[in-house]
Amino acid sequence: MADLGFYKMHALIIDDFENFRGTLYKMLMDLGIGNVDSAASGEEALRYCKTRNYDLILCDNNLGKGKSGQQVLEELRSTDNPCAESLFILVSAESSKSIIMAAYDYEPDAYLAKPITPKALDQRLNRLFEQRSELKEVLAAQKAGDDALAIKLCNDLVAQGSRYTNSCQKILGQLYLKQNNLPAAEELYRTVLDNRELEWAQLGMVKTRLAQKDLLGAQQWLENILQSNPLCMKAYDLKAELFKLQNNTEGLQEVLQKATDLSPLSILRQQELGAVAQQNNDLLTAANALKRAVKLGEHSCFDKADVHSLFAQATIDLFSIDKELAKPLVRDAVACAVNMEDKFGKNNLRKAESLLLESQLQVCAGDQRRAQDALVSAQSALGSSKDESALPVQIEMVRALRLLGRTNEAQECLAELLHRYAANEQQLQKLDVLLDEPRSEKNKLMVAEINKKGIAHYNAKDFAAAADAFKTALQKLPNHVGLRLNYVQALIDKLKTGFDVSLSEKIQQTFTKTTAIISQQHPQFQRYRQLNDVYNSLVRAHEKQQRG
Amino acid sequence: MEPRSTPQHSDQDYDQMPIDFSFVLASSVHDMKNSLGMLLNTLSAMVEASPPKDAQQAKLFSTLEYEAARINGELVQLLSLYKMDEKTLAILIDEHHVIDIIEEQIARNYALLTSRDISVEVDCDSDLAWYFDSELLGGVLNNLVVNCARYCRERLLISASEDNGYLCISVADDGQGYPETMLLGPAPQASVSFNSGNTRLGLLFARKVLSLHKSKRGQGYMTIENGGPLGGGVLKLHLP
């Protein structure tokens, strides 16, 4: 056996059990590894990894409190540090399959099942380092960013009939895709697939089709994969990519829902589900997915402040259409809003945002005094900044003032913002979220188009399609009374064709929201009253029928 | 005084609730695996703190390790079978070197094999590569090695080669051979018998894993024969 130079190597053991660290330490020393460090937690390990380059990291997946092994791996591979390319072995007491399902983009070099015996570790390490040593130059070229050289070296190894041809082909496929050399990628995957239908090559084919903008082709490959393996999470992720390219947000939500049902532990999928459900105005799905994303973010390098504020906002929005549905989420949302500064660093804007979200959530929790206190603190934290970066927080301020019933102050604040940004299309688009009629050109156009589309569906008596059209605009313009009434009218006409409880609930929710934003002076107030009457009589007729 | 909150389910509700036994079993298997992991850790710490004084003590320790490893193997199989039944076991077929998976099982059971003075011969071209789920097939092969270590006298032969478009891994021993009932071809599931002391969970697991390996040519299967190259039984795994 070739000398792999174990004596020069530096290894790191990560396990929360002292016994186990001791056992592994002895095994590695007996194998002749030169230096072995150990860490009791993922956090401690990551500190070590900032200071030196380890050749080998042996990490238990279940580390008790704090980060999991998978999260340690994700942080090492996705951030800039000396151990981004270290050989990483994930140790676990159970089958590796459940870890693979939860993983998103980052895979360890190997999985090792407990119990670990000295001989088994010896055999595995020799195998892995032999492979590393054969692919050493390829990896070096990749690291140096010389893709052309890496491709040449891989092709040389394949031509020599290397023992690691399979690994070389995987790397080659990635490099071709990265370089956008799609004919080469396609040929490579075809060659592999002619021999055997291997999943990684099928997935590579999907990526090639997506890059070629052949969406139908990509879809056919994806259906093939999912038919033979309905648990292939990478196929779901690519299906999500496909829906994004098609701008199909409903399909995107559906596939993310399916993926998170199968494997709820992936934070990135939960974050995406929350964001797209929010965009689709499905607030219940959004708030619940975001709640899970915040929870999964506790120890993850993928946690983001935006996800926290989106969770708080989704809960507040949900409360405005249905108090009962929002209730179970409010406590977590308050905690999430309050912790934002501690988690993501202190600054005045973040402080104001966190207080404003808290203030609105306290209204949801029924605590007016705390709500008012938080608002006052927010006002002093925000001050009177004229900087554009303050706009999102100022918008939040208007929302909070409205929810707390301080309508005049809200109006003054909004008027001032509209005045300041009267000539700024970009910022006007953001302000439209607060307005009945949009001010930005883009959103004016959108309303006109959507109304045209929705009304065409409505006149063709396709009420479901009409409702869908109006609904998509409502997320961007939640305070647009005309759109909301168009939406509710389409829903009511659908209800007339057959009574359906969940549809009726949706209508009730829309009325709740409309009641909160419409004033008696509004030009469409009369229409609102009429629609409300029609709906109520439909409900009464249905109830009578049920009893009779 | 605060009113006492009423529990969501009264005991009567629990009375009526059907037990999803496979789920209960799967979660308790999970717990058992964790405990077993601790047990194995503690055992190895103990051996380290007070190394065996003589051959007899060493043998006792190795028996402990062997039995614990056997329970561990059975639990892994149970969990995998449960997941197969629930259709939540993902199968990951890729190209692997056959020699690696064979050597891995021998390494895993090194202590057991040496303590029983069993010599293992391997006959496999080191460049032979094939398509399989290495974790699942490794589990099957590990069971076979552990089982043979129990029933063979002193020799074990593991060979692998391509045969008519299929990979054939055969495990032969110099024991008394397999009982007549096992030679009758693929046993139906009903043959899992609790009376014989051998529930044949291993065979059920092996057949399931093999049948998950499919290609255009067909699917994997297993054959059992007596009068093998070492005089005892031979069990062959065939993979398309």
Image (cartoon, coloured by chain):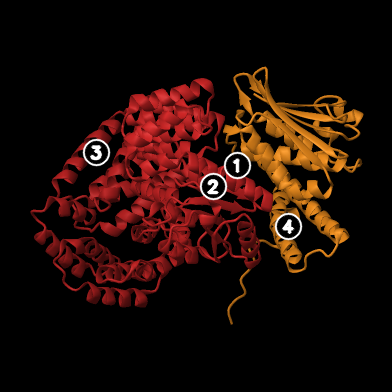
Chain colours: A red, B orange
Q: Position of residue B172 (x, y in %)?
A: 81, 31
Residue holding disc 4: B36
Please say if B216 is above or below A341.
above
Q: Amino acid at mark 4?
A: Leu
Can you see residue A461? no
Kindly indicate the quadrant of the structure image that contains residue A50: bottom left
CA–CA distance between discs 1 and 4? Answer: 35 Å
Kindly indicate the quadrant of the structure image that contains residue A159: top left
Residue holding disc 3: A450
Residues flagged by tags 1 and 3 on a common chain: yes
- Which quadrant: the N terminus of chain A? top right
Point out the frontmost of discs 3 and 2: 2
Disc 1: which chain?
A
The one of A245 and B159 positioned closer to us in this rendering: B159
Q: Amino acid at mark 3?
A: Ile
Q: Amino acid at mark 1?
A: Met
Cβ–Cβ below 8 Å for labels 1 and 2?
A: yes
Determine the secondary structure under disc 2. loop
Determine the secondary structure under disc 4. helix
Residue holding disc 2: A4
